[in-house]
Image (cartoon, rainbow, N blue to C red):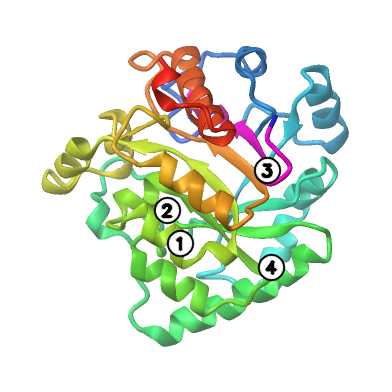
Amino acid sequence: MANDAFNVKIGINPISWSNDDLPSLGGETPLYTALTEGRAIGYQGFELGNKFPREPDALRELMAGYRLDVVSGWYSGRLATRSVDEEIAAVEPHLRLLAGNGCKVMVYGEVADSIQGERTVPLYKRPRFRDDDPFKRYGERLTAFGRYLLRHGVRLAYHHHMGAYVEAPGDIDRAMAYTGDEIGLLFDSGHAYFGGGNPLDILTKHIHRVCHVHCKDVRPAIIRHARNRQWSFLDSVLNGVFTVPGDGAIDFAAIIDTLRTHAYQGWLVVEAEQDPAVAPSYAYASKGYRTLRALVDGTPLKEVA
């Protein structure tokens, strides 16, 4: 268990077993396989995917049967193009699902104009705010929406993401500058690196807004190919751009040390989109868990096979 000074839990996203955006990757894998294996590995909770029940009571009963927590769940937001009132109406079922299962954060991904799910559109064609004014207005809408979520006990965890409006380090800076403290940052190590930044620098700069952490590693050679060959986000995933902590180039020891130093409390979530036919789900999920567990517990990484 994590010690009292570093109150974190280690969870996982089911994307290691089946991919919502690319159903061909593990689409045949039943949910019970992911939950059974995740629990056996040692994970304490799961983020949601499209195979989970969407009613609060049914979800609570399912997860209790595996002695697993509901960590959070992705919400496809569109505040870049619609009003706060429209977003509040759209989020209601998802908010009820999360709040009814004890979740403290909601993963907010901006999908308006996003190309992250477009197989044939290269990443350089992602949307951008043309200047600061529309970005500021976006930030105002986010803050108002986040304030609404907080009234229901859930904090908005903003996910900077490849192919979306907020991808690069400068985008993250402005998103945090133009929103209030109602909005937390979901720090994603893999997207931080792929987006052109140094993950540790981004984490350190915005540590006081970080309310949720996605732990994914990267393969830099694949990132170079993705940029040079103008791949889409999905093609980048198919070619293995991401992997689990301990299997790529990111210094997770420094990341965990920074989180510990600043008394981060919350979840560390392994989330690494890969093809399970190439990267077997159990083996890679186990490696990611053992890497994080060793770092949280202060065990030498050389002991992690």
Amino acid, disc 2: His
**Does the stretch in magenta take in 11?**
yes
Question: x and y percent of residue 305 in the render?
Answer: 40, 14
Question: x and y percent of residue 265 in the render?
Answer: 68, 50
Amino acid, disc 4: Gly
Q: Which residue is mark 2?
A: 161
Task: Give the quadrant of residue 22.
Answer: top left
**Does the stretch in magenta take in 135?**
no
Q: Residue at x 38, y 49 (%)?
A: 191
Give the residues drawn in magenta, as a range.
2-16
The first of marks 4 and 3 along the sequence is: 3
Question: x and y percent of residue 250 in the render?
Answer: 34, 41
Q: Nearer the viewer, mark 1 or mark 2?
A: 1
Q: Is residue 87 above or below residue 29?
A: below
Q: Which residue is mark 1?
A: 204
The first of marks 4 and 2 along the sequence is: 4
Amino acid, disc 3: Ser
* View extreme (bottom): residue: 133
* 59 horizontally vs 17: left or right: right
Which quadrant does the N terminus fall into?
A: top right
Q: Nearer the viewer, residue 237 or 68?
A: 68
* 6 horizontally vs 282: left or right: right
Callout 3 environment at 10 Å: few (<14), some (14 to 19), or many (20+)? many
Task: Tell me how far mark 4 sits from mark 3, CA to CA.
Answer: 15 Å
The first of marks 3 and 2 along the sequence is: 3
Question: x and y percent of residue 145 in the render?
Answer: 68, 70
Q: Which residue is mark 4?
A: 146
Q: Residue at x 17, y 48 (%)?
A: 227
Q: Which residue is mark 3?
A: 72
Mark 3 secondary-structure assignment: loop
